[in-house]
Amino acid sequence: NPTRIIFGTGTFARLGKEAARYGKKALLVKAAGPLAKMGVYAKAETLLSEAGLQVVALEGVAANPKLSSVREGIKLCQQQKLEVVVAVGGGSAIDCAKAIAVGAVDEGDVWDFFTGKRAAAKALPIGAVSTLAATGAEMSLHCVITNEAEKKKYATHFEVNYPKFSIIDPELHKTVPRFLTACGLCDAITHAGENYFIGDRNTPMTDRIAEGVILTVIESDKVLDEPDNLELRAN
């Protein structure tokens, strides 16, 4: 897995330095929800600006990110010649960023990649800041987008969509609501269990890793009653 994971309390502060490795003009993909009120996006913009990046924002990416948001982000990248796509949020913001990254360097319709008409061989570099522990979108090549006009939800799996770096800072996870934290616990268990039960059967070592993930999630469910516990959030 080529994604560079930067993990630990306080690592959000490294966003600007890491993004600056890949360009001087960034698209900041923002998820709809409480992160703006919490000051997370203002901090992200400050960190990027202090590192010398010009920042253009794509606002309000919804859960189950929409094709319309992807197209809006592609337009911003192409018109303003942006060089790196930075997502701050959960899987929806990160998936939207992945789709934008392949579409921004392409002259055709980005939806072609999701219907299998074409394969993506290049993309803008992607950086991610994960604010939710769930599906692992911050270190995967998977990208799921909803075409609201056609009522279709399709996925791509292009290697160019691995983020260059992903920051996972438990401090940013402290304010995730109890219900969404519980959803994340279930997501992590489900994703670890999928390959355990339906993958290649001759994988004893990765089966043990999956068991470890599932057990750790279950053992950490006290986080539902101790949302500010950074050790539980980190685990």
Image (spheres, rainbow, N blue to C red):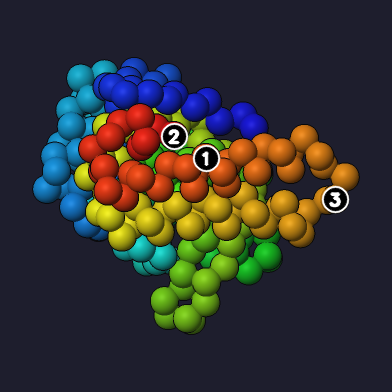
Residue under circle 1?
A: 216
Image quadrant where one finds the C terminus? top left
Q: Amino acid at mark 2?
A: Asn
Quarter of the image for residue 139 reads: top right
| Cα distance between the residues tagged 2 and 1 | 7 Å
The image position of residue 30, as x and y in percent, is 28, 49
Residue 15, visible in the rendered structure? no
Quarter of the rendering occupied by the N terminus? top right
Q: What kind of element bears circle 2?
A: loop
Element on which disc 1 rests: helix
120, 61: nearer the viewer: 61
Instruction: Determine which quarter of the picture holds residue 230.
Output: top left
Residue 209, picture quadrant: top right
Q: Is residue 134 above or below residue 46?
A: below
Point out which mark residue 201 bears.
3
How many numbered marks appear? 3
Which residue sits at x=55%, y=53%? 189
Query: Which SS class for mark 3?
Result: loop
191 horizontally vs 77: left or right: right
Circle nearer the N terminus (2, 1) = 1
Question: In this figure, which residue is indicated by the disc labeled 2?
Answer: 235
Residue 74 drawn at (x, y percent): 40, 52
Q: Position of residue 196 (x, y in %)?
A: 72, 52
Most extreme residue toward the bottom is: 150
- Asked whether the residues under the numbered discs 2 and 3 touch, taking CB atoms below 8 Å apart as contact, a structural biologist would say no
Q: Given contact means CB atoms under 8 Å apart, are the residues at marks 2 and 1 in contact?
A: yes
Q: Residue type at mark 3?
A: Arg
